[in-house]
Image: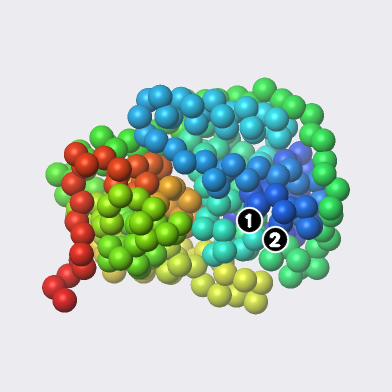
């Protein structure tokens, strides 16, 4: 089992690795980890949770990861700029790989900022990886929630629906990070608990890092979540939720899944309930 978070020193010593830069192409071109391939669609792709949407997403990323050189033998290591500036985009790639059943995936903890802080080199050369056939394993399919799964959980008190969006989204002031009115409705999934994703990280000399297991569990305890609580995560499109997914899994929470369609999908279906306004008596 591959360690989910690797340090710059660990990455520099790894063999049989495919390094994936999830940043925008212009950031990649300005300087990236030597040998890294650029796959920004990991961040930009908007998914829907119906069967057609999940099939399209599965086919797209199986092809993209195969083109990057992942055959099942290599370890995929993804990175972004830092853990709090890319909205969790490297973790989004990690979750997609988990969902596709890929057995060897990790995130560079601290991103490229931690890499350069450790004195590691950058490159502007674009590699030409040998394409591979990506092995999709359905074993990870249960990690991906549909809107029907979340709707059913509204009446199940054993499941914690955890909203990790920014505070302006949680209080229904904004519908998304792309603008207040990007989505047709503002608000929350009814009954959701809230921990802003930043709270699961802390500052270090090499940039923000995911908190230790005891620290993450302490944050979760403030909303009544423990290691045995089934947790359904959502944000706007599954990126910040993926950062939180990694934090919760590292902390030992046993059953963590993501509603990847998240608010971008939920808010566009008028048949689905929302809570709007402030989540408490003002």
Q: Nearer the viewer, residue 14 or 272?
A: 272
Q: Would residue 11 be seen by someone viewing this image from the given angle? A: no
Q: Badge 2, how many Cα within 10 Å: few under 14, some, many 20+?
A: many
Whether residues under marks 2 and 1 lie with C-beta atoms below 8 angstroms apart, the answer is yes
For the point 35% across and 68% down, which residue is it? Answer: 167
Q: In the depicted view, which residue is nearer to us: 235 or 182?
A: 182
Q: Specify which label sits upstream in the sequence, 2 or 1.
A: 1
**On the rendered structure, is 103 left or right of 223?**
right
Say which quarter of the image contains residue 129. top right
Q: How many marks?
A: 2
- Numbered disc 2: secondary structure: helix
Question: Where is mark 1, residue-wise?
Answer: 80
Left or right, 45 with reference to 122: left
Q: Is residue 85 left or right of residue 155?
A: right
Picture residue at 62% right of the left edge, 27% below the top: 63
Q: Residues within 10 Å of mark 1 (few under 14, many from 20)?
A: many
Q: Secondary structure at mark 1?
A: loop
Find residue 221 and report its horizontal and vertical position in percent.
30, 66
Q: Residue 269, located in which quarter of the rendered image? A: top left
Name the residue beneath numbered marker 2: 112
How was this image coloured?
Answer: rainbow
Vertical comparison of 74 with 237: above or below? above
Q: Tell me if I can see residue 194 in this picture.
A: yes
The numbered mark at residue 104 is none
Residue drawn at x 18%, y 46% is: 273
Q: Is residue 192 above or below residue 67?
A: below
Q: Quadrant of the C terminus?
A: bottom left
Q: Quadrant of the N terminus?
A: top right
Marks 2 and 1, how far apart at CA = 6 Å
Residue 84 or residue 29, whichever sits in front: 29
Residue 261's spot in the image, x, y percent? 38, 41
Query: In this rendering, would 161 be left or right of 182?
Result: left
């Amino acid at each position: 089992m591959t360690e989910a978070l690797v340090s710059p020193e660990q990455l520099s010593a790894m063999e049989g690795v495919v390094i994936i830069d999830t940043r925008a192409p212009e950031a990649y071109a300005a300087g990236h980890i030597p040998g890294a391939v650029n796959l920004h669609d990991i961040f930009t792709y908007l998914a829907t949770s119906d069967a057609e949407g999940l099939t399209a997403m599965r086919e797209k990323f199986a092809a993209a990861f195969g083109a990057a050189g992942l055959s099942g033998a290599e370890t995929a290591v993804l990175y972004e700029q830092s853990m709090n500036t890319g909205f969790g985009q490297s973790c989004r790639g990690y979750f997609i790989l988990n969902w596709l059943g890929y057995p060897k995936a990790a995130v560079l903890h601290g991103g490229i900022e931690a890499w350069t802080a450790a004195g590691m080199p950058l490159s502007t050369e674009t590699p030409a990886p040998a394409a591979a056939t990506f092995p999709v394993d359905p074993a990870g399919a249960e990690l991906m929630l549909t809107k029907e799964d979340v709707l059913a959980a509204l009446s199940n008190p054993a499941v914690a629906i955890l909203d990790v969006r920014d505070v302006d989204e949680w209080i229904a002031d904004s519908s998304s990070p792309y603008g207040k009115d990007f989505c047709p409705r503002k608000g929350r999934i009814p009954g959701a608990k809230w921990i802003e994703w930043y709270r699961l990280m802390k500052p270090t000399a090499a940039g923000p890092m995911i908190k230790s297991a005891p620290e993450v569990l302490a944050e979760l305890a403030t909303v009544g979540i423990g290691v045995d609580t089934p947790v359904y995560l959502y944000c706007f499109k599954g990126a910040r939720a993926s950062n939180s997914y990694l934090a919760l899994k590292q902390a030992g929470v046993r059953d963590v899944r993501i509603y990847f369609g998240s608010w971008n999908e939920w808010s566009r279906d008028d048949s689905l309930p929302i809570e709007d306004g402030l989540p408490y008596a003002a």
